Image (cartoon, rainbow, N blue to C red):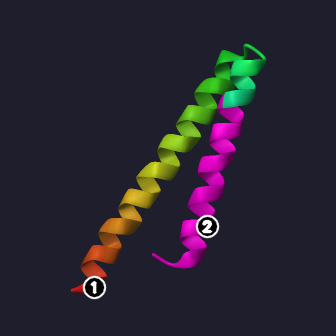
Amino acid sequence: MGWFDKLKNKKDEAKGAAKEHLGQATDDEQMEREGQTDQSVSNIKQAGEKVKDAFDKD
Protein backbone atom coordinates (compact mmCIF):
# COMPACT_ATOMS: atom_id res chain seq x y z
CA MET A 1 0.00 0.00 0.00
CA GLY A 2 1.47 3.30 -1.00
CA TRP A 3 1.78 6.07 1.53
CA PHE A 4 -0.60 8.20 -0.53
CA ASP A 5 -3.33 5.54 -0.37
CA LYS A 6 -2.82 5.18 3.39
CA LEU A 7 -3.09 8.92 3.85
CA LYS A 8 -6.20 9.16 1.70
CA ASN A 9 -7.92 6.32 3.57
CA LYS A 10 -7.09 7.86 6.96
CA LYS A 11 -8.41 11.22 5.75
CA ASP A 12 -11.66 9.60 4.64
CA GLU A 13 -11.93 7.75 7.95
CA ALA A 14 -11.40 10.96 9.95
CA LYS A 15 -13.92 12.80 7.77
CA GLY A 16 -16.47 10.06 8.43
CA ALA A 17 -15.84 10.17 12.17
CA ALA A 18 -16.27 13.95 12.19
CA LYS A 19 -19.49 13.66 10.20
CA GLU A 20 -20.79 10.99 12.59
CA HIS A 21 -20.02 13.10 15.67
CA LEU A 22 -21.53 16.21 14.13
CA GLY A 23 -24.66 14.22 13.33
CA GLN A 24 -24.83 13.04 16.94
CA ALA A 25 -24.36 16.57 18.26
CA THR A 26 -27.08 18.01 16.05
CA ASP A 27 -29.45 15.02 16.26
CA ASP A 28 -29.12 14.55 12.50
CA GLU A 29 -29.51 10.79 12.07
CA GLN A 30 -28.86 10.87 8.32
CA MET A 31 -25.53 12.66 8.77
CA GLU A 32 -24.60 10.23 11.53
CA ARG A 33 -25.33 7.24 9.26
CA GLU A 34 -23.38 8.82 6.40
CA GLY A 35 -20.38 9.24 8.71
CA GLN A 36 -20.59 5.61 9.77
CA THR A 37 -20.82 4.55 6.13
CA ASP A 38 -17.81 6.68 5.18
CA GLN A 39 -15.78 5.06 7.94
CA SER A 40 -16.84 1.57 6.88
CA VAL A 41 -15.92 2.21 3.25
CA SER A 42 -12.52 3.52 4.33
CA ASN A 43 -11.91 0.44 6.47
CA ILE A 44 -12.83 -1.86 3.58
CA LYS A 45 -10.42 -0.01 1.29
CA GLN A 46 -7.65 -0.34 3.88
CA ALA A 47 -8.30 -4.08 4.19
CA GLY A 48 -8.15 -4.46 0.40
CA GLU A 49 -4.85 -2.61 0.26
CA LYS A 50 -3.43 -4.87 2.99
CA VAL A 51 -4.41 -7.94 0.97
CA LYS A 52 -2.68 -6.50 -2.08
CA ASP A 53 0.43 -5.81 0.02
CA ALA A 54 0.47 -9.38 1.29
CA PHE A 55 0.50 -10.72 -2.27
CA ASP A 56 3.11 -8.21 -3.44
CA LYS A 57 5.60 -9.32 -0.77
CA ASP A 58 5.65 -12.93 -2.02
Kindly indicate the quadrant of the structure image that contains residue 37.
Answer: top right
Quarter in which the C terminus is drawn: bottom left
**Residue at 42% in and 51% down:** 44
Relative horizontal placement of residue 3, taking residue 44 as reference (left or right):
right
Q: Residue at x 78, y 17 (%)?
A: 26
Q: Is residue 16 magenta?
A: yes
In percent of width and height, residue 18 lies at: 70, 38
Left or right: where does residue 45 sit relative to residue 29?
Answer: left
- Whole-angstrom CA distance, mark 1 to mark 2, is 21 Å
Which of the 4 image quadrants contains residue 6? bottom right
Q: Does 18 appear above or below 7?
A: above
Amino acid type of the residue tagged 2 in the rendering:
Leu
Instruction: Identify the element where label 2 is drawn.
Output: helix
Going 54% across and 42% down the picture, which residue do you hit? Answer: 39
The percent position of residue 49, horizontal first and vertical second, equals: 40, 67
How packed mark 2 is, by other alpha carbons closer than 10 Å (few <14, some 14-19, many 20 or more), is: few
Residue 4, position in %: x, y?
A: 60, 75
Residue corresponding to mark 2:
7
Disc 1 marks which residue? 57
Q: Is residue 38 above or below residue 47?
A: above
Q: Residue furthest left?
A: 58
Magenta range: 1-20
Q: Residue at x 46, y 50 (%)?
A: 43
Q: Mark 1 and 2 residues: CB-CB less than 8 Å, in contact?
A: no
Residue that protrudes farthest toward the top in the picture? 27
Q: What amino acid does circle 1 point to?
A: Lys
Quarter placement of the N terminus: bottom left
